[in-house]
Amino acid sequence: MAGGALQAAAQTAILPLEEVRPGMVGEGRTVFAGEEVESFGVEIVGVLDGAMPGRSIVLANLSGGPLAHTGVMQGMSGSPVYVDGRLLGAVAYAFPFAKDPICGITPFEEMVRFTEMPLGTGAAPGVAAAPALRFSPAGEPSFDPAPVPEVGIERDGRQLLPIRTPVAASGLSPAAHRVLAPLFRQLGMELSPGGFAGAMGAAAAPQTGDSPLQPGSPVGATLIGGDLVLMASGTVTHVDEATGEVFAFGHPFTGLGTISIPMQAARVEANVASLSNSFRITSAGTPIGVWQQDRATGIRGRLGARARTIPLRIRVEGSRGGRRDYDLEIVDHDLYSPALAFSALVAVLSQEERPAGTQTIRLGARIAVGDGRTLAVEDVFASGTAGVLPGAAALVAAPVALLLGNPVERIPVREIEVDISASEEAQAATLSRAWLRSSRVRPGGTATLRVALRDFRGAEATRELEVPIPRSAAGRRLTLLVADALSVAVADQRQGVTGTPARVEQIYRAISRHRRQSRLYVRLVGSGRSAAVVGGEYLPSLPPSVRSVISRDSSGGMTRELPASVLWEGHLDFDATVSGSRQLILQVEAR
């Protein structure tokens, strides 16, 4: 038995797995309402040895309280089970759609053994194998690959699965729930209503002789705290009064090893019966510690300590007038921080602004990073373009994902500040025409580009831009691309212009040069292999001597020649979103 289990055994006797037999009768402890721990009946059905690699699961039939009506509920994960006064383990698994409250119990011995690891022994930050947050052109988020794969057999209820973790959400509108629920479902969590009566940023309650938790108490892992709360909830399996260590859940929460997530007291408000998975509605209390280990058999933390978090401050000037400030804190984690920043912004935007109808949102953000720099992004989002609220939220979440999860090195995020202004007018324009004063131009001269944009009411406005023509382009036929941000991004991807960053400075430049929806980009393109991506850096015009060296390079894909070269790029700024693209042909005169 591991050292931690021996310490636990000094206070609570442990029932070894080899002594477990079908027909044994015991009791479980959990909270069905409020904060008072209640008992429920447990009858051992059998033991599934080797149910998972190196692990066993005890099958049991539960009774008492509302269980005959609700079955095993989300939020019961971690509820301790005792036989003859000895701790067997934690309620952790269930059958979806089951008519009887049959559960799977994780033996406490395994909860200790799998979480008995030094802090910091998890996967190194930035490892490419970790799931990455991706965004569609409309700003819809998803993980690649999904941290919790979809299991087809779950639909017919025959597979014993970890009880999904309910996430109590306060301050979440129905519109925000529709956007965020699929994202959290990929993480093995289900959003549910919730309340809050504490402050995530406050100091954790000091450890005393009288623990704020006991076996069976509801407990939370707070992902977002402050003026908006997202708290994953479960049940305490064991508290070691000597060390202040807490065991809970009996199955993975995030499943990513070493973590630093605030531990929160909780209160059960109601039980909701469901044909698929019943769940508990929970409110968050005060911070009481930090969760430090998240392994296959549960989570383990310590009372009185404080977790690492990232301050997120959002200031909103709404379309109805007035200003409101939100002070939030999100978990500092490679996988979760981007998703939580996205979630917080969707929640705030959907609460402050309407989810449908004409509107325009202007968003600017400053992201302070570990080396003292501050990175800035800004853009305009208007109805008539895809995904106004998700797109605005992704503007902040995408660079956070790149900073924390890039393949070069983890760049710590110290603080995020966001300014939002909104109006109930759709300030969006469409490129209706683009033409040149003359399609024949001189090398070293300029070409005059004219563009006409039409707003959503049909009014048209015209702008001009002078495009410089390189002397080296004499006698060549060039293409002038006039396009919105999405079209340019698609063109870059198709032509292989974008490369994987190889240095931190490239990551900073990629963030600062993000394509804005409020810009019309103008790009002069020439054919011929004079451009390449070297070490993640785009080099548009290379002399023949350098190209010959590059063509012989064999550095495992770090060097790539391109069939076309961007000779010049500029843009026109607008006080609205811009969509549309055109291609024009220029013939450069010979010298």
Image (spheres, rainbow, N blue to C red):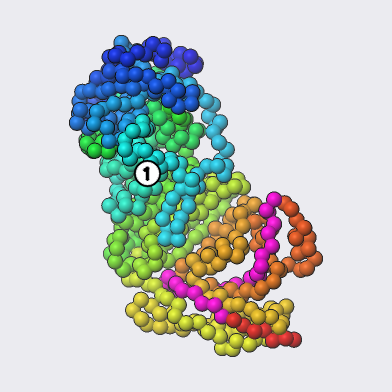
Compared to residue 132, the image places residue 18 above or below, namely above
583 inside magenta stretch: yes
For label 1, the crowd category at 10 Å Cα-Cα, with few meaning under 14, some 14 to 19 and many 20 or more, is some
Residue 387 in view, yes or no: yes
Q: Residue at x 20, y 23 (%)?
A: 64
Q: Which residue is drawn at 57% across and 53% down?
A: 373
What is the total number of numbered labels drawn onto the structure image? 1
Compared to residue 7, the image places residue 522 above or below, namely below
Residue 318 image offset from top left, x and y in percent = 32, 62
Compared to residue 571, the image places residue 410 above or below, namely above
Residue 218 in view, yes or no: no
Label 1, on which residue? 185
Residue 4 image offset from top left, x and y in percent = 47, 18
Q: Quadrant of residue 329?
A: top left
Q: Residue at x 65, y 62 (%)?
A: 538
Q: Which residue is drawn at 42% across and 60% down?
A: 138
Nearer to us in this view, 153 or 325: 153
Q: Which amino acid does label 1 sit on?
A: Arg
Q: Residue furthest right?
A: 545
* Residue range (magenta): 556-584
Looking at the image, residue 348 sits to the left or right of residue 119; the answer is: left
Q: In which quarter of the image is residue 441?
A: bottom right
Instruction: Determine the secondary structure under disc 1.
Output: helix
Residue 57 image offset from top left, x and y in percent = 39, 23
For the stretch drawn in magenta, the main secondary structure is strand
Image quadrant occupied by the C terminus = bottom right
Nearer to us in this view, 187 or 44: 44
Looking at the image, residue 331 sits to the left or right of residue 477; the answer is: left
Compared to residue 541, the image places residue 41 above or below, namely above
Q: Quadrant of residue 40?
A: top left
Residue 330 image offset from top left, x and y in percent = 42, 44
